[in-house]
Image (cartoon, rainbow, N blue to C red):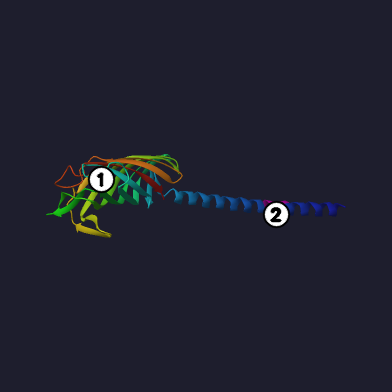
């Protein structure tokens, strides 16, 4: 009888030890999965390093913007819709002192299109843009700019608000003027290049975003065209921002 009791105790002890080992193994696996999930969240947040000075922030392809200009000038359509912009953020670098707040700068690529009304034709003379009266013809000034933003971003992972200013470096050698007109049923397009623009302009923006989609408003008080400050003396923009 005594041997039977000792045998049962030994079997019970063996079973308890096995269960404890299994529980330890399960806890270790759960801890590993939790660490992996936290690592994925860290990558999703674009966090690269944490130091005693705070949390540094880095993101590539941060957002893509589509906007419509309202141009302040006598030779352009009034209202938003005819003139447009596309802006693409390539990299953003900054600091995040709190989970809900970051300050960043970076580099954006921006394409602008400013369309005149149907009674205006632009031409280039000595690299300056000249305004000519026209009938049933309209011209479009297209330019490319490298943009450096300085922005404050408030919010959580998928919603919030950002505001700040852009410094636009307008590349005159990437500027063109396209004029379109029709003769009968045939449409023609004339193109001229290297129109002179002011090399640097500024604009101010605010954007509210939720769930990866934002709405923004932007205002540029700077004159764009070199030698003709009244042609595009300012412009405002409304648009959609896709947070990538």
Q: Is residue 53 visible?
A: no
Labels 1, 2: front one:
1
The residue beneath circle 2 is 18
Q: Secondary structure at mark 1?
A: strand
User: Crowding near pointer 1: few (<14 within 10 Å), some, many (20+)?
Assistant: some
Is 17 within the magenta? Answer: yes
Q: Is residue 57 visible?
A: yes
- Residue for point 21% across, 58% down: 191
The spot of residue 38 in percent (x, y) is: 50, 49
Towards the viewer: 115 or 64: 115
The spot of residue 118 in percent (x, y) is: 24, 48
- Residue for point 74% across, 53% down: 15
State whether the magenta stretch is mostly helix, strand or loop.
helix
Is 218 within the magenta? Answer: no
Q: Secondary structure at mark 2?
A: helix
Towards the viewer: 81 or 212: 81
**CA–CA distance in space, label 1 to label 2:** 66 Å
Towards the viewer: 191 or 112: 191
User: Crowding near pointer 2: few (<14 within 10 Å), some, many (20+)?
Assistant: few
Residue farthest along the left direction in this orientation? 126
Q: How many marks?
A: 2
Mark 1 or mark 2: which comes first in sequence?
2
Determine contact: label 1, label 2, CB under 8 Å.
no
Span colored in magenta: 16-20
The residue beneath circle 1 is 167
């Amino acid at each position: 009888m005594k041997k039977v009791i000792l045998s049962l105790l030994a079997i019970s002890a063996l079973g308890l030890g096995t269960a404890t080992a299994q529980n330890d193994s399960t806890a270790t696996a759960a801890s590993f999965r939790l660490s992996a999930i936290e690592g994925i969240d860290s990558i999703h947040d674009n966090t690269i390093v944490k130091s005693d000075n705070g949390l540094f922030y880095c993101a590539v392809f941060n957002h893509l913007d589509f906007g419509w200009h309202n141009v302040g000038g006598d030779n352009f359509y009034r209202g938003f819709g005819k003139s447009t912009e596309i802006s693409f953020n390539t990299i953003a670098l900054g600091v995040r002192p709190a989970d809900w707040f970051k300050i960043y700068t970076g580099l954006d690529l921006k394409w602008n299109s400013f369309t005149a009304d149907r009674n205006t034709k632009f031409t280039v003379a000595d690299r300056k843009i000249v305004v000519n009266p026209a009938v049933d013809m309209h011209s479009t000034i297209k330019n490319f700019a490298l943009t450096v933003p300085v922005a404050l971003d408030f919010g959580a992972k998928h919603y919030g608000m950002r505001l700040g200013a852009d410094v636009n470096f307008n590349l005159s050698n990437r500027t063109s003027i396209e004029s379109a007109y029709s003769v009968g049923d045939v449409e023609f397009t004339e193109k001229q290049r290297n129109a002179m623009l002011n090399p640097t302009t500024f604009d101010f923006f605010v954007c509210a975003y939720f769930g990866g989609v934002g709405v923004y408003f932007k205002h540029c008080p700077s004159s764009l065209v070199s030698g003709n400050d009244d042609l595009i003396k300012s412009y405002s923009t409304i648009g959609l921002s896709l947070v990538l």
